[in-house]
Each structure stands twice: as C-alpha cells, then as structure tokens.
Image (tube, rainbow, N blue to C red):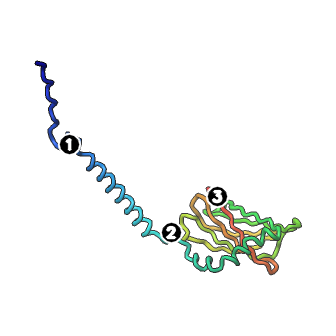
Amino acid sequence: MSEQPKSIEKKKGYFQLGKHWPFVIVGMLVFHASLMVGTILVVAARHDLYVDKDYYAKLVDWDHQREMMEAADKLGWDIELVAMPKEISPGYQMQITMIDQEGQPMDGALIELEWFHPAHANERAFLVFAEQGEGQYKASVDAVNPGFWRAELAIRYQGTQAMVSREIEIQ
C-alpha cells in the first residue's frame, strides 16, 4: 500500500483563515464615506465664500451684460489695467490706460472697478477711478493677498456703456 500524504493543518483563528478581508473593505468604505460627508459639511458651512450675491440679478440681465462686454471690442478700445505696489503703504495703485480705435487717449470716462479674489467671492472691493489726463485713470486698493484677482470694469464714455473683465496676478 502506498503511504497517505500528511494532512495539511488548517489554520486556526478567525483572521488566520483569510476572513478579515470583508472587514478591511467595509472599513475603507466607511472611511471614504465619512471623509466625503465631512468635506460636504465644511463646504456647506462656508457657502458665502463661493457664491456671488448678485448672481440672480446678473443672470436676469445677462443679454444686456453680454452686449456691454462686447461694446469695448466692437468700438476698438484698447484698455490696459496694471496693478503697481504702493511705495508708502501696503496695497496697490491700479492704473488704467484707455485709447480709442484711432489711437487717441480717452479722457472724460467714468470707470468703476469691482475687485475680488475668486476664492473669496464675498469679499469685494468697489472703486471709482480718478482721471489723470491723457487717457490715464488711477485708484488705490488696500493691501491684498497674493494670487490671481478678478477685475471687472464698468466704463461710461460719451454715452456708451461697456464692461471689461481682466485677471491680474498680485505677488
């Protein structure tokens, strides 16, 4: 007769049998779900940072705003916005240069600026530029955080209304 092979000893203990994998998978799913719920709670608590308060009014008036956004391009206006650090106090000096399609400086415009960081849409600054002559306009902005800032200009010049939107990097 032939010899019987030795019987393989069965592993003893629950985790030695390989039955722990369902607990690992369930634990990972619970961890992921709690992480997602925590993220949603944090974002929901600070929703005012990400939502534009005038969103509905802008939505209703979208056609008129789109016409105003295209007006400066249609008229051939060249509008340059530059942010320069102030020398004396913290903040920036905003300077706009406006030139018409014939290359002439545009004096006598009323320019308003809405200035904000996209990560903090609820913290907006509203400025009115002072005319300096030769198509130059200036305004001061108090100290701001570095990053990319959104500048939305509302311009009134000789009966024409235009809107211009720029992104400026502050260092």
Q: What amino acid is found at the position of numbered circle 2 in the picture?
A: Leu
In the rendered structure, find residue 169 and report the number of the disc placed on it. 3
Which residue in the rendered view is the most extreme toward the right? 102
In the rendered structure, find residue 165 and report the number of the disc placed on it. none
Residue 2 lies, with reference to residue 34, above or below; the image says above
Q: Which residue is mark 2?
A: 49
Labelled pair 2, 3 in contact (Cβ < 8 Å): no
Which percent across, then down, holds residue 128? 69, 75
Which percent across, then down, holds residue 89? 62, 63
For the residues labelled 1 and 3, the Cα–Cα distance comes to: 57 Å
Q: What amino acid is found at the position of numbered circle 3 in the picture?
A: Glu
Q: Earlier in the sequence, mark 1 or mark 3?
A: 1
* Residue that appears at 10% across and 18% down: 1
Q: What amino acid is found at the position of numbered circle 1 in the picture?
A: Phe
* Residue that appears at 79% across and 77% down: 157
- Can see residue 131? yes
* Residue that appears at 72% across and 71% down: 69
**Where is residue 61, by image quadrant?**
bottom right
In the rendered structure, find residue 15 and report the number of the disc placed on it. 1
